[in-house]
């Protein structure tokens, strides 16, 4: 069924690039009062969660986008808005995104649902009767939808929202190779390549030579100038994907959800 969008931008923000840049550069949300908790994962690593609010009100899990974190403007703004409505929130920082690199070569990608599943089950074990919901942005939205499709009726939530989701990763990767979108691509790739480089150094400093070697074997990344190349060289190699096409296909096709 085709659903007609009712979105109507402000008259001075009709251009999609302005809609992207304005909030990212000029929005100044109030900083919510946060309490950070580190959860140790089953694979002897960790994820950092930033909680906002207290009591037994409904709890909303938030997932940020590529190269984002709980400190991203859209996450902080939403946590503050939810708090004002009497809702608690738990912002998941994907691995290596909380301000401290994680302890393995494992990172995050559009189809990686293990950490959201671990967080949900941890929270559900603590609060079996609490009403829960989830909101994911961009890459986080894709992770959320894929996870919901995988889990089906095993997940109990009163709502789930996915914002600006790259449902067809191959199309989105190609879109970033043209026109004004090249600016976004350059910025994102610069951050991702730095992430891999600094994380390799961090693992070596911790004495985790085997994990550091996994990242070193990826090779130099300076020549990479597209997401097709980055996802083929980095994500496909770090995870069990045959190549970039396999990664894009397996990360968008979700059981139980029709696009």
Image (cartoon, rainbow, N blue to C red):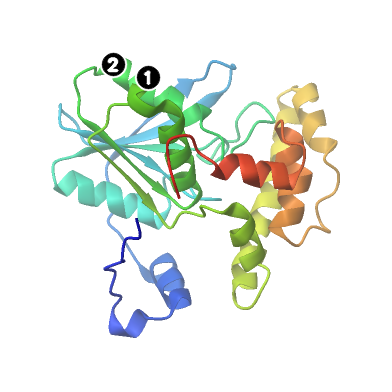
User: Picture quarter containing residue 216?
Assistant: top right
Q: Position of residue 153 (x, y in %)?
A: 33, 25
Q: Is residue 191 left or right of residue 243?
A: left
Q: Is residue 224 above or below residue 205?
A: below
Q: Is residue 223 left or right of residue 201?
A: right
Q: Is residue 186 visible?
A: yes
Identify the element where label 2 is drawn.
Answer: helix
> Which residue appears farthest toward the bottom when viewing the image?
12
Counting labels gives 2
Viewer-side residue, 195 vs 122: 122
- The quarter of the rendered structure image containing the N terminus is bottom left
Q: Position of residue 60 (x, y in %)?
A: 28, 37
Q: Is residue 14 left or right of residue 184?
A: left
Q: Is residue 74 left or right of residue 250?
A: left
Identify the element where label 1 is drawn.
Answer: helix
Question: Badge 2 local density, few (<14 within 10 Å), some, or many (20+)?
Answer: few
Question: Badge 1 local density, few (<14 within 10 Å), some, or many (20+)?
Answer: few
Q: Are marks 1 and 2 in contact (CB under 8 Å)?
A: yes
Q: Position of residue 91 (x, y in %)?
A: 37, 39
Q: Is residue 188 visible?
A: no
Q: Is residue 170 above or below residue 70?
A: below
Q: Position of residue 147 (x, y in %)?
A: 45, 33
Q: Is residue 134 above or below residue 212?
A: below
CA distance separating discs 1 and 2: 7 Å
Residue hosting label 1: 122
Residue hosting label 2: 126
* Residue in the image at 59% along x and 16% along y: 44
Viewer-side residue, 250 vs 166: 250
* Residue in the image at 79% along x and 22% along y: 210
């Amino acid at each position: 069924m085709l659903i007609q969008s009712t979105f109507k931008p402000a008259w001075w923000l009709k251009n999609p690039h302005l809609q992207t840049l304005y909030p990212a550069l000029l929005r100044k949300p109030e900083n919510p009062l946060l309490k950070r908790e580190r959860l140790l994962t089953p694979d002897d690593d960790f994820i950092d969660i930033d909680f906002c609010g207290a009591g037994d009100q409904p709890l909303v899990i938030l997932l940020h986008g590529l190269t984002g974190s709980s400190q991203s403007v859209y996450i902080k703004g939403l946590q503050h808005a939810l708090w004002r409505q009497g809702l608690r929130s738990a912002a998941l920082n994907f691995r290596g995104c909380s301000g401290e690199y994680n302890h393995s070569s494992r990172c995050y990608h559009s189809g990686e649902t293990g950490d959201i599943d671990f967080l949900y089950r941890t929270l559900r074990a603590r609060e079996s009767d609490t009403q829960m919901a989830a909101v994911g942005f961009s890459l986080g939205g894709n992770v959320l939808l894929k996870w919901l499709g995988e889990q089906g009726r095993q997940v109990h939530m009163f709502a789930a929202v996915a914002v600006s989701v790259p449902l067809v990763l191959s199309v989105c990767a190609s879109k970033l190779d043209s026109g004004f979108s090249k600016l976004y691509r350059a910025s994102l790739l610069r951050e991702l390549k730095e992430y891999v480089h600094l994380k390799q150094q961090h693992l070596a400093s911790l004495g985790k030579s085997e994990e550091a070697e996994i990242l070193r074997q990826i090779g130099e990344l300076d020549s990479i100038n597209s997401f097709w190349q980055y996802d083929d060289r980095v994500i496909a190699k770090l995870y069990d994907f045959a190549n970039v096409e396999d990664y894009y296909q397996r990360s968008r096709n979700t059981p139980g959800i029709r696009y």
